[in-house]
Image (spheres, grey):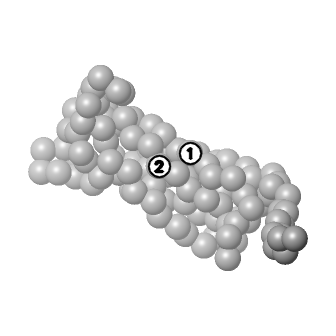
Amino acid sequence: MMSNIPNETMSGSVSAEAQAGEIVTITITRPDNTVDTVTATTVADATIATQGDFQATYTPPTVGTYTAQADIPADGTYAEALSAPVQFVVTSALLGRTISLSAVAAS
């Protein structure tokens, strides 16, 4: 089923010690306490963003208050890092619409 709710873009950065290409897991708790996860990769190209920046897109399935928290695992040199939880509110869905196409016979 396709959602009429717009995507939420989540972005953040890992401290200067982050290596490019590290996987960040974002855990999202829905209003009904169901948990979703999305992943992002820290950027490698400092010409487009600061090394350690990441971005992920999530499509909420319903309106309500969500909580997101990012996590990057330990890598043998650095300990696991966990962001503070962040809430976001989805207040309304886009209105749905339909389109139909009719063939007209050529005269």
Q: Is residue 37 left or right of residue 58?
A: left
Residue drawn at x 29%, y 23% is: 47
**Label located before the other in sequence (1 or 2):** 1
Quadrant location of residue 53? Answer: top left
Quarter of the picture containing the C terminus is: bottom right
Can residue 41 be seen in the rendering of this structure? yes
Callout 1 secondary element: strand
Q: Is residue 8 left or right of residue 100?
A: left
Pick the front one: 95 or 36: 95
What residue is shown with label 2? Answer: 56
Q: In this rendering, is residue 39 above or below 53?
A: below
Query: Farthest residue in the top direction?
Result: 47
Residue drawn at x 26%, y 31% is: 45
Pick the front one: 88 or 62: 62
Badges 1 and 2: C-beta atoms under 8 Å apart?
Answer: yes
Could you say where residue 44 lies in the image, as x and y percent from the top left?
Answer: 24, 36
Could you say where residue 68 lies in the image, as x and y percent from the top left?
Answer: 55, 53
Residue drawn at x 74%, y 61% is: 4
Q: Is residue 53 left or right of residue 6?
A: left
> Looking at the rendered structure, which numbered label has been put on residue 92?
none
Could you say where residue 105 lies in the image, as x and y percent from the top left?
Answer: 84, 74
Quarter of the picture containing the N terminus is: bottom right
Could you say where residue 54 lies in the image, as x and y percent from the top left?
Answer: 39, 41
Between the residue at mark 1 and the residue at mark 2, the CA separation in whole angstroms equals 6 Å
Q: Amino acid at mark 2?
A: Ala
Q: Amino acid at mark 1?
A: Thr
What residue is shown with label 1? Answer: 9
Can residue 65 be seen in the rendering of this structure? no
